[in-house]
Amino acid sequence: MWGWRRRGAGPSGRGAEELRARRREREAALRKARRQEQLVSKRLLREDTTAEEGGQDGAEIVPDPLSEDEVLELLRAVQRGSEDRKRSLSRLRWALQNKETQQKFVRLDGSIRTLIGIFTSSLADMQMEAARCLHELSHSSDPAVAEACLPVTSYLLTYLSGHSVEFMELCLYTLGNLVVESEAVRKQLLPQGIIPVLASCIQSPHEAVLEGLGYVLSQLLQAKEAPTEIIPLVLDSVLPQHMLRLVCSGLKAGIGAAVEFAWCLHYIVCSHTANAALLSLGALPALTSLLLDLASEIPQDAPEGLELLVCPVLRCLSNLLAEETGCEVQIQDERLLIALFLILQCFLQQHPFIVQECLWLLNNLTADEPFFCSALLSLDLLPALLQLLPCSQMASVLVLTVLCNIAEKGPAYCQQLHRQPALPLLLPTLALPDPEVVGQCLELLHLLFLHWPEAAADFVTQGGHRALEQHQSTPELQERARALLDMVRQPLGASAFSPCHTTLSAFS
């Protein structure tokens, strides 16, 4: 059966929490829209300067591009050490929100060097303005702009200790943005010691710093070179144990950081290079316990964005369970099934993508382990599972696969499946135009008929043989459809339909 097949400028002190909440809302929309992809994305911390720059009602206004002469004049104004320097920096930051202006700025000789000089000065307010200018540049989609910022990376790392939370947060998101765009930046940051610096920062008591750190780390872990060059360094640090701690304390400490580190764990698990290390840290029981806690929150007052944490936790558990090396630490706790169905019930309408994640985990729980197959039946969860058949194409395939996992366990399990109203629901499924769904349905019928012949007799009584006959001309289904027709035509007393063994090779 299947394992896991398929395998997410700094705020002002007064409005920081509001701006951070707004950013999380945007990130929630992004994660939902791109939930099937890796979540390589840039983030922008920007003050609410719309009133100052002429915006109305909080609407974002992108400035018009400046001419090369205007950019040069701005740079010269910044280079002059006049009292107006901060205002010039503020104007530059506003102008750098335009992509064309960014490109013109980095092409000017000494432009980045000037910003670095101010960024490393001892004047805190000027330092912050320069940091915001660099942050605007880091948000560019032009790799040339990111690479122009290479000289600033060592300073960004240096300032991740001993500075204000706001300043550290800005440095972290600037680093994360640069990491997304440029392999050259990543290759420079590794020998500069970014992993040890992050390992030190992860013990910060400030959620804003932890959330920003999680963003940087998640971007690093999605790089194509991560399995060979980045994950080994992460494993040699204290990061994994702290990531696991922060994910599992998310409901108490702050859901934003927990979401970031849950995706980090997901990317590590997906690399298939570190799962033994994660299992040795107790990741499987810890994440299982977290899922039980998350499910217990749902009927009460679940925090906003809970689905963003549930999704990567489900994926981590699914993938860890699919690891062959993890067989000796398989969990056997029927509460996990109850938690899954509570989560399904809660998120089915508003966040239907969670259904697929739950079903992947349910599939991996039942694939080799009779305990969960028995528990699913004894807890009377089969009707709830069958109700998910029409949710989506992938949900149909996964529900049918879970049923196949149960049926594979033998006659006693098939007898219980037969007692449930499964067959009447399978008949409409056979009429669907999707060959993958119908094919999985044929696999389930084969197992039911093989282990419990009475199911074949009932199937014929309900007119199922006519549905099979319709697929005799479908190239990818015809062999299995004909094999099942041969099975249902056998006398009920035939021993396991033994005359049909050669035909049943279609299912092997």
Image: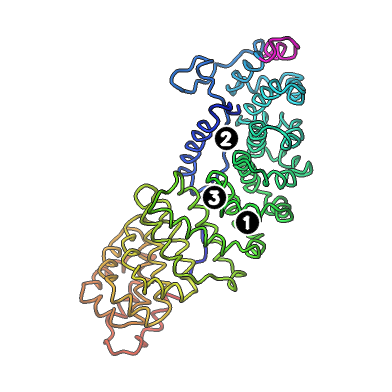
Q: Residue furthest right?
A: 191
Q: At x 37% / y 82%, what residue is drawn?
A: 412
Q: Main secondary structure of the magenta part?
A: helix
For disc 3, the neighbor class at 10 Å (few under 14, some 14 to 19, many from 20) is: many
Closer to us: 75 or 155: 155
Q: At x 43% / y 53%, what residue is drawn?
A: 297
Q: For residue 271, which numbered disc appears in the image?
A: 1
Kindly indicate the quadrant of the structure image that contains residue 495: bottom left
Q: Is residue 381 left or right of residue 238?
A: left
- Residue corresponding to mark 2: 43
Q: Which is nearer the N-term, disc 1 or disc 2?
A: 2
On whether residue 307 falls in the magenta region, the answer is no
- Residue corresponding to mark 3: 250
Q: Which is nearer the N-term, disc 3 or disc 1?
A: 3
- Locate residue 272, reporting x and y percent: 63, 60
Between the C-alphas of marks 1 and 2, the distance is 24 Å
For disc 1, the neighbor class at 10 Å (few under 14, some 14 to 19, many from 20) is: some
On whether residue 85 falls in the magenta region, the answer is yes
The residue range painted magenta reads 71-86
* Res 436 seen here: no
